[in-house]
Amino acid sequence: MQTTKIILADDHALVRQCIGAILGKTPGIEVVAEAATGMEAIRLACELQPDLILMDLVMPEGGGIEASRCIVSAFPNVKVLILSCHGDARSVREAFGVGAKGYLMKNCDAQELLHAINVVSEDRVYLSPALSESLGIELPTALLKKSPLSRREEEVLTLIASGKTSREVAVLLEISPKTVETHRMHIMKKLNLNSVASLTKYAIRQGLLPLD
């Protein structure tokens, strides 16, 4: 049996220990290293070139998205499986966009974790069924598409959808109210939307705005 070598990347030691205990009892899997930061994950990937990295999204020094981008770019054969507490469309889209092969939530059970590892190790794409249901998709294909909005436009949209006026947005982003209005016009045109209410619904669907 071929052994799948894995790096655990999470800034919480207890999470790494718990996952390590599960994987340590699983035949065919070997945890070769642990990383607590994005930069450490990149360094260990360069040194060890594992088969798979189980990657958290929110970590110090780069985070999971930037670390995944660097690792997949340098070592295409290293599979990245995201394990996160963030289940919004934006996070999932960004993860697959930088080359992650799978995404599941931290509230999954051990059986799903091992299944996801097997799927990704076989160079197939995995998306948690819970996420698939909540996002309304069966496969992450739709999430691979880049957002039509620029990063600045997403920032403006988020603030507008949260109830900020153009002047308030301008102050927060340190731009002029006229520039905010220009961004608003471009956003509505790109999304084919014509009201703040419709912009708010879009922002919620994309994970730019909390449901509550």
Image (cartoon, rainbow, N blue to C red):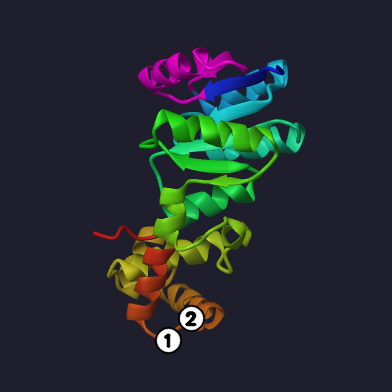
Residue 169, relative to residue 2: is it above or below? below
User: Gap in Å between the C-alphas at discs 2 and 1?
Assistant: 6 Å
Stretch in magenta: 9-36
Magenta stretch contains residue 196: no
Residue annotated with mark 1: 194
Magenta stretch contains residue 32: yes
**Could you classify mark 1 by the number of other residues whose Cα lies within 10 Å: few (under 14), some (14-19), or many (20 or more)?**
few
What residue is at 63 percent from the left and 37 percent from the top?
120
Q: Is residue 130 left or right of residue 75?
A: left
Q: Nearer the viewer, residue 26 or 36?
A: 26
Please provide percent x and percent y for residue 150: 57, 64
Residue 128: mark in rendering: none
Secondary element type, mark 1: loop
Q: Nearer the viewer, residue 158 or 69?
A: 69
**Could you classify mark 2 by the number of other residues whose Cα lies within 10 Å: few (under 14), some (14-19), or many (20 or more)?**
some
Using the rendered image of the protein, determine whether residue 56 is visible from the camera's viewpoint: no
Please provide percent x and percent y for residue 161: 34, 70
The amino acid marked with disc number 1 is Asn
Q: Earlier in the sequence, mark 2 or mark 1?
A: 2
From the image, which quarter does the N terminus lie in? top right
Cβ–Cβ below 8 Å for labels 2 and 1? yes
Please provide percent x and percent y for residue 151: 53, 59
The amino acid marked with disc number 2 is Met
Residue 14, relative to residue 55: is it above or below? above
What residue is at 37 percent from the left and 84 percent from the top?
195
Residue annotated with mark 2: 188
Residue 179, relative to residue 143: is it above or below? below
What residue is at 46 percent from the left and 35 percent from the top?
112
Please provide percent x and percent y for residue 38: 54, 28
